[in-house]
Image: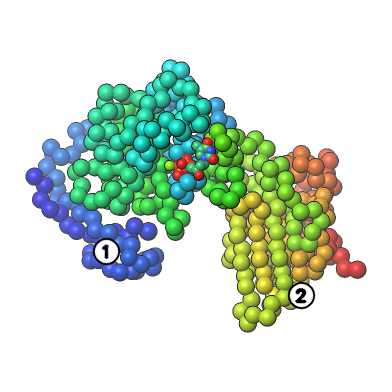
C-alpha cells in the first residue's frame, strides 16, 4: 500500500501552502483557513499511474475535433455558456444557499434531456420526496431525467458506468466524498479530489457535467481556486434575496465569452427568463429625483440599463459614513475625491450612500460618470433629467473618457425610450449622429455638471 506521504497545509481561501499549521494565512491573511493535506512521497509505481501516456505530436497536424453542443432552449441560460452545452464539458455553478441553483439545474437538465436523452441528477442535499415535490412545482416533463440521492463518489461512478448518461449534475460538490480519503465531505481535500475525479470522468464518458457549489460567507466557493481551475466553465447565480430576479454570470468559459449575463425571475413555478432586463430594472425608477441616474452597463455582449442612486447628506459624525452597494467602494472614493478636488464640491462632512437599484452589481468603469453625477445631483439637490442616459469613464484629473461599444449602449437606451445621452466629447465626435438620440458630449466632470445640473 502507499506509504503515508508528506503533510502540507493548504489555505482554503487562496491555496497558499505551508509546511506547518498556522493560525493565519501569511499570504491572504485569512484566519483559521489552513487545512491538512497529504501528498504521497517519492515516485509512484507504474501501476498507480494512468495507463495511457500522451505521445507529443505537431500542433499543426491535430484534427479539429467535432464539438458536440446542445442547447437547452432556455436562452438566458444558453447565452451564459456561449450558446450551448458542450459535450464532455464541466460547468461549475456557484451561489449563495437558497438562491436557486438546484432549481435552475433541474430545469436545465429537464430541457436538455427532452424526450430521448438521459440525464442524471445526484442530490446529496435533498431526499427523493423533496425532489419530487420540487419537480411537480417546476412542471418537469422529461422521461430521461433520473435522480438519485447519493454522496459516495465510488457509488456514483458505478451508477455512471451502467447508465452512461449524456448529462450529469452533482448537487452539491460539498456533500460528495470519496471513500479513499479520511477527510470530511466539504473539506478542501475532499472537494478537490472528488471534483478532479468527476472532471476526468466527464471527459472520459463525454458527459456534460454540472457541479453545484455553495459559496461561503467570504463569497468564494469552498476550495475556490482549486475548483475554478479544474472546470471548463464557471457560472455564478446571484441576486438579492428580497428581490425576485436572479443574475447568472459567466466568470470563466473555455467555450465562449466571459462576463455574459443571463437574467431570470424566481416565480412559483421556478426560474423564468427575463428577455428584456432593462425594462425590469427600470420599472420602479424614481423619475426626476435628485441623486438618481440611469446608466447603460455592458454585461458581456449585452447592454443593461440600471438606475444608480446616491444620497449625500450632512453629518455630525467625526468620521462620515461611506456606504455603497452594487459598485466598488474604492471606485466611489476616487470619484468623491475627484468631485472635491476638480469640481469643488465639499464632500467632507457629508454621509455618502450609493446604491444600484435592484441589487445589480456594476463593475465597468463606464458607469463612473453616472456614479459621479448621482452624487453631485444629490449634493446639489438638482435632479438629472429623466430622459438622459449617462456613460463615460472618469479619470483622476476629472476628464471624461470614451468607453467600449457605445452603439450597443445607445441602442438599448433608445429602445427603452431615452431621448438624450451624455458621453465623452471625443466619443461623440467619433460617433457623429445617432438616430433617435440627441448626443451631448462633455470633456470633463465639471462640464457635465454645468451642462446637466445648472444652478439657478
Ligand atoms: P433552491 O434551488 O433550493 O436554491 P439553492 O439550490 O441555491 O440552495 O431555491 C430555493 C429557493 O427558491 C427557496 O427559497 C424557494 C424558492 N423557489 C421558488 O420561489 N419557486 C420555485 O418554484 C422553487 C422550486 C423554489
Ligand atoms: Mg440546492
Q: Which image quadrant is residue 381 in?
A: bottom right
Label 2, on which residue?
A: 344
Left or right: residue 257 versus residue 275 is: left
Residue 63 location (% of width, % of height): 39, 26
Q: Residue at x 69, y 77 (%)?
A: 315
Residue 374 location (% of width, % of height): 73, 61
Q: Secondary structure at mark 1?
A: strand
Q: Nearer the viewer, residue 57 or 114?
A: 114
Q: Which image quadrant is residue 210 in?
A: top left
Which residue is the extreme one toward the bottom? Answer: 318
Instruction: Classify the position of the N terminus by image quarter.
Output: top left
Find the distance from the CA under tag 1 to the CA under tag 2: 50 Å
Which image quarter has ligand 2? top left
Q: Which mark is residue 58?
A: none
Which residue is the extreme one toward the left? Answer: 1
Q: Residue at x 71, y 42 (%)?
A: 279
Instruction: Classify the position of the C terminus by image quarter.
Output: bottom right
Does the residue tagged 1 have its C-beta within 8 Å of any atom of ligand 1? no
Left or right: residue 453 versus residue 244 is: right
Q: Residue at x 24, y 29 (%)?
A: 158
Q: Which image quadrant is residue 341 in?
A: bottom right
Residue 198 location (% of width, % of height): 31, 37
Label 1, on which residue?
A: 18
* Residue 201 seen anywhere in this rendered image of the structure: yes
Q: Which of disc 2 and disc 1 is earlier in sequence? A: 1
Left or right: residue 70 versus residue 171 is: right
Q: Secondary structure at mark 2?
A: loop
Q: Residue at x 34, y 40 (%)?
A: 124
Q: Is there CB contact under 8 Å for labels 1 and 2?
A: no
Q: Residues within 10 Å of mark 1 (few under 14, many from 20)?
A: some
Residue 299 location (% of width, % of height): 61, 45
Amino acid at each position: 500500500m502507499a506509504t503515508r506521504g508528506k503533510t502540507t497545509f493548504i489555505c482554503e481561501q487562496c491555496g497558499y501552502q505551508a509546511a506547518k499549521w498556522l493560525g493565519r494565512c501569511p499570504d491572504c491573511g485569512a484566519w483559521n483557513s489552513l487545512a491538512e493535506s497529504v501528498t504521497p512521497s517519492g515516485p509512484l509505481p507504474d501501476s498507480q499511474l494512468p495507463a495511457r501516456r500522451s505521445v507529443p505530436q505537431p500542433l499543426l497536424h491535430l484534427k479539429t475535433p467535432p464539438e458536440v453542443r446542445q442547447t437547452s432552449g432556455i436562452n438566458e441560460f444558453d447565452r451564459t455558456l456561449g450558446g450551448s452545452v458542450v459535450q464532455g464539458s464541466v460547468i461549475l455553478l456557484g451561489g449563495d444557499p437558497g438562491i436557486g441553483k438546484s432549481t435552475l439545474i433541474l430545469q436545465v437538465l429537464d430541457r436538455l434531456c427532452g424526450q430521448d436523452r438521459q440525464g442524471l441528477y445526484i442530490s446529496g442535499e435533498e431526499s427523493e420526496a423533496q425532489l419530487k415535490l420540487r419537480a411537480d412545482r417546476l412542471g418537469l416533463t422529461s422521461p430521461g431525467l433520473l435522480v438519485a440521492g447519493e454522496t459516495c463518489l465510488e457509488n456514483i461512478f458505478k451508477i455512471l458506468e451502467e447508465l452512461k448518461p449524456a448529462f450529469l449534475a452533482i448537487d452539491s460538490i460539498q456533500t460528495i466524498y470519496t471513500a479513499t480519503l479520511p477527510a470530511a465531505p466539504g473539506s478542501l481535500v475532499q472537494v478537490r479530489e472528488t471534483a478532479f475525479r468527476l472532471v476526468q470522468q466527464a471527459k472520459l464518458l463525454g458527459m456534460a457535467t454540472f457541479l453545484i457549489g455553495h459559496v461561503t460567507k467570504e463569497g468564494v466557493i469552498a476550495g475556490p481556486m482549486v475548483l475554478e481551475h479544474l472546470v471548463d466553465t464557471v457560472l455564478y447565480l446571484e441576486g438579492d434575496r428580497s428581490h425576485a430576479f436572479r443574475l447568472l454570470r459567466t466568470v470563466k468559459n473555455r467555450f465562449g465569452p466571459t462576463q455574459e449575463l443571463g437574467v431570470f425571475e424566481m416565480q412559483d413555478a421556478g426560474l423564468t427568463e427575463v428577455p428584456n432586463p432593462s425594462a425590469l430594472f427600470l420599472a420602479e425608477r424614481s423619475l426626476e429625483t435628485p441623486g438618481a441616474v440611469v446608466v447603460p452597463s455592458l454585461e458581456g455582449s449585452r447592454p443593461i440599463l440600471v438606475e444608480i442612486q446616491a444620497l449625500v447628506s450632512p453629518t455630525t459624525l467625526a468620521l462620515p459614513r461611506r456606504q455603497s452597494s452594487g459598485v466598488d467602494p474604492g471606485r466611489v472614493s476616487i470619484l468623491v475625491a475627484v468631485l472635491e478636488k476638480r469640481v469643488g464640491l465639499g464632500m467632507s462632512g457629508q454621509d455618502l450612500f450609493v446604491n444600484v437599484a435592484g441589487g445589480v452589481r456594476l463593475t465597468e468603469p463606464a458607469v463612473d460618470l453616472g456614479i459621479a453625477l448621482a452624487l453631485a445631483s444629490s449634493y446639489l439637490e438638482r435632479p438629472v433629467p429623466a430622459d438622459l442616459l449617462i456613460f463615460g469613464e472618469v479619470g483622476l484629473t476629472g476628464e471624461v473618457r470614451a468607453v467600449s461599444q457605445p452603439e450597443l449602449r445607445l441602442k438599448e437606451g433608445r429602445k427603452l425610450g431615452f431621448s438624450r445621452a451624455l458621453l465623452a466629447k471625443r466619443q461623440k465626435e467619433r460617433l457623429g449622429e445617432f438616430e433617435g438620440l440627441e448626443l451631448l458630449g462633455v470633456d470633463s466632470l465639471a462640464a457635465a455638471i454645468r451642462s446637466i445640473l445648472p444652478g439657478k
